[in-house]
Image: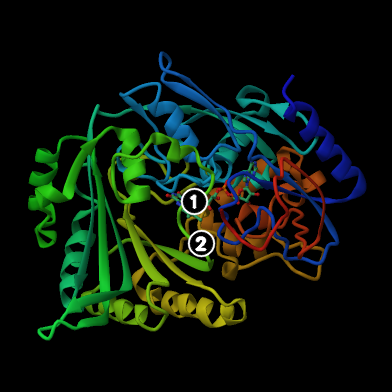
Amino acid sequence: METFSIAFPATVYCAKKHGVQIRTRSGGHDYEGLSYVSYFNVPKFVVIDLRNLSSVSVDVESKSAWVQAGATIGELYYAIGTKSENLGFLAGDCHTVGVGGLFGGGGYGYLARKYGLAADNILDAKIVDAEGRILDKKSMGEDLFWAIRGGGPASFGIVVAWKVRLVPVPKKVAVFDVLRNLENDATTKLFHQWQSRAYKVDEDLTVYMTFQTAVSSTIDHNGKNVTKIVLQADMRGSFNGSVDKLLGLMEKEFPELGLQRQECLEMKWVESFLFFILFRSGESLDVLLSKKSNFNFLSLKVKSDFVKEPIPDDVFEKMLEMLYEEDVGKALIFVFPFGGKMSEISESAIPFPHRAGNIYAILYQVSWEKEEEKEKHANWVRRLYVYLTPYVSKNPRATYSNFKDLDLGTNNLNKGGHASIKQASIWGTKYFKNNFYRAKAACQRAGAGRLGVCSMSMGNGGGLERAGYRCDEVLGGEVIFAIGWEKEISSSRMQ
Ligand SMILES: Cc1cc2nc3c(=O)[nH]c(=O)nc-3n(C[C@H](O)[C@H](O)[C@H](O)COP(=O)(O)OP(=O)(O)OC[C@H]3O[C@@H](n4cnc5c(N)ncnc54)[C@H](O)[C@@H]3O)c2cc1C
């Protein structure tokens, strides 16, 4: 018998009996830290940390895999890539993100325009529900199975494992990651081209763009090193095919970039993640197994939007100007394209509703080192978000539930964490549009209301988590015990 089948139901039972909150943590990459931080004044909580529950079993014949919730996407990609050259999976490209939270909220990656989100490709799941029962797709019923695929699983129970459909990938993919230090107007031209085409191009091609400031050094005519702050545009792409074909497509669709053959590489699908992590090729695939990121993460705040019409050039130029207001390299704007398969899947297929009509999504991010300056920096993202109001999705102004943003609303701090459905729908419909109401009903039918599955596992960020059923979030409460913890809970968000 697997340990979780005793430990999790027992934890749920004890927590319920003693009225203690539960937090579930898989990869720990929640943008508001809700898998291990508490925001409400409840003295004690339990963290169920699944990081050691991370086995992956790939079945090449049935083109599927069972992956335990504590696995990172790096571990999943490694398991697939070492078993087959022709199968892959679609999730993100940061290898340390956990599949527990990522798949439960959607899971966007380079293959999304071809095959949809990770959550669109979940075939089965094992969860521990509010009663401490272990359920699979059949025993949990259609509604609950629908709800956990994108609705934020913490609202419904503890996901123990996902069964996913593996997708075909060619023996070699072509990739590039090009940094250009440009003047603002050249960047605007590049972005203009990207935003009017990236969602329409061949669905085998996915191109992301990131903008941030950087220090550039040059040697002047006196041989002196001169530094200045410049705007850096990073264009990263992955293509299911050869470099030859990629170059032809890029020349046709994004001539402003002027992509060169020497900037492109061909490699196995699984190796492309190493390339995007390390910005070089030829390393051992073992890097994917590390649960420690090679990025130095600081405290950060993100907000996000969906875009339906291209943003006017002058508005984009103002966005670029705002990047210079923060410390060099600490603020960024990241855009990733929709279209393709993402537009073909119905809005109600799973709780993630942001489909046809969305041309791309934007993530605004700022990070900082001095905690006492948190509000100053977080306010930069808030100002940018306000500035973008007329140019992004409306009624509701939609947000990706995996990019949690507590600014959109939380349960009442003073009423035991409760919120009315009407109140919760303010943020719930931003994350899930009308799917919020179906997921809420699934949560109640699953008995989550009685225990308050919300209080069992989720923080106050995700939407349904805060849907007002019973979200008794705690603030910096004492952790009673934690399963699988290797080190003390610390204030550092990600490792
Ligand atoms: C560096 C970085 C890169 C990212 N890249 C991408 C990307 O490429 N694509 C993308 O779509 N998103 C991306 N994200 C967003 C990411 O999908 C979410 O932050 C996701 O929720 C993280 O999952 P986790 O398991 O690592 O986090 P955790 O902090 O462990 O969990 C996140 C939430 O899910 C709940 N949860 C976790 N595990 C379980 C479980 N087993 N059962 C029930 N509830 C659970 C937690 O309680 C919490 O509410 C990225 C985030 C970061 C910080």
Q: Secondary structure at mark 2?
A: loop
Q: Which mark is residue 123?
A: none
Quadrant in which residue 473 is drawn: bottom right
Of residues 45 and 200, the one nearer the viewer is 45
273 with respect to 298 (left or right):
left
**Pointer 2 residue Cβ closer than 8 Å to ligand 1:** yes
* Residue 287 in picture, x, y percent from top left: 44, 40
The residue type indicated by label 2 comes to Phe
Quadrant in which residue 273 is drawn: top left
Q: Where does the N terminus fall, quadrant-wise?
A: top right
**Pointer 1 residue Cβ closer than 8 Å to ligand 1:** yes
Q: Which mark is residue 293?
A: 1
Which residue appears at 11% of the width and 62% of the height? 256
56 with respect to 270 (left or right):
right
Which residue appears at 21% of the width and 60% of the height? 194
262 with respect to 33 (left or right):
left
The residue type indicated by label 1 comes to Ser
Q: Residue furthest front?
A: 223
* Residue 46 in picture, x, y percent from top left: 79, 49
Mark 1–mark 2 contact, CB under 8 Å?
yes
Of residues 115 and 297, the one nearer the viewer is 297
302 with respect to 11 (left or right):
left
Q: Is residue 460 above or below residue 4?
A: below
Q: Which residue is mark 2?
A: 297
Is residue 430 visible in this depiction of the protein? yes
Q: Secondary structure at mark 1?
A: loop
